[in-house]
Amino acid sequence: MGFVGLFDTVASIVGWDNLGNLSSQHIPLLQLYLRPNRIGNVVQLVARDEKRFNFALSEVGPDHLEITLPGVHSDIGGGYRALLQEELMVTPLQSLEVALDQDVTDTSIYRDALEAKACWIAEGWPDDALHIVTPNAERLPPDSEDRMAPPRKRVYAGLQIKREVRGELSRVYCRVMHALAKAKNVPFEDIDDKPEFQISEELEPLCDRFVAGDYTLTPAEESLLRRRYIHTSAHWNHPLAKASGKVITLLYINSPMENGIRVRHPHVRTR
């Protein structure tokens, strides 16, 4: 086999081998090892910003070439709509019991949300897209063991990102892989000038540089990507949640790694 091009390989399969742990290196009935002596050229484009617990990366390095590029899993391989309205909790929605007359802004959970917002801004995410949300407080029933106790309520606070995100970043990486393959004599035709393949004007300088093999970013480009193109894949929205303000405490399938560092499985034979 002459060339294999991979877009951020993730193998999330549940089985007895991994006891239901999607981030485990033990993947039932699947062998992802690519022998260097059998495959001449392997390239994997890796999502720099992916950090979901359930999206561990299957590495191909150091046996093969890996190129880390800005974006999350589907920014690399595609799958997002051309325009998407994000409204996602980027921290868990915390709750706290307080006195009935205490304002949520004067609580530890609100301060936690403020601290999280400052961290996100420091990483380059747009200030105007980050909002501290405080769903309606829930008045608690009287204490059955202390009828004279003052009334209390449960308040909520968390950090949400709300913005419009474009889906064209994966088109850049399609062109990158296309160029890498053609450089290894893969007989691809040129990419059509159809709307579904077009790159926005503001991405063209970055795209041209990446296709040429220079994967560096200017500070302005980094800011542009975080504001308009890199999606938020790791979040604390529940897929069954309704817009009711109520807290749902079931499994969060898109939650991030606790330390924010993606699990990476080494390129070794597993069976």
Image: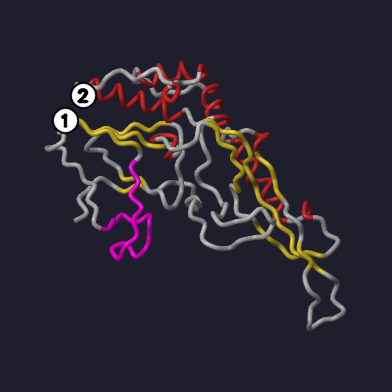
**Numbered label attached to residue 197:** none
Residue 67: percent from left, percent from top: 34, 31
Q: In this view, does 103 lie to the left or right of 156?
A: right
> What secondary structure is marked by label 2?
loop
Q: Is residue 125 above or below residue 246?
A: above
The reply to whether dot 1 and dot 2 touch (C-beta < 8 Å) is yes
**Which kind of residue does numbered mark 2 sit on?**
Val
Kindly report the distance in space between the C-alpha atoms of the residues bearing marks 1 and 2. Answer: 8 Å
Q: Position of residue 183 (x, y in %)?
A: 24, 20
Is residue 27 rendered magenta in the image? Answer: yes
Give the labeled residue for mark 2.
186
State the residue in front, 119 or 234.
Answer: 234
Q: Relative to 41, say whether 190 is above or below.
A: above
Pointer 1 or 2: first along the chain: 1
Q: Is residue 117 left or right of residue 8?
A: right
Q: Mark 1 points at which residue?
A: 2
Residue range in magenta is 9-28
Give the quarter of the figure containing the C terminus.
Answer: bottom left
Q: Decide which of 243, 33 is in the foreground and name it.
A: 243
- Residue closest to the eye, 205 or 146: 205
Residue 195 in the image: state x and y as whole percent: 45, 22
Instruction: Give the amino acid type for the residue marked by disc 1 in the picture.
Output: Gly
Badge 1 element: loop
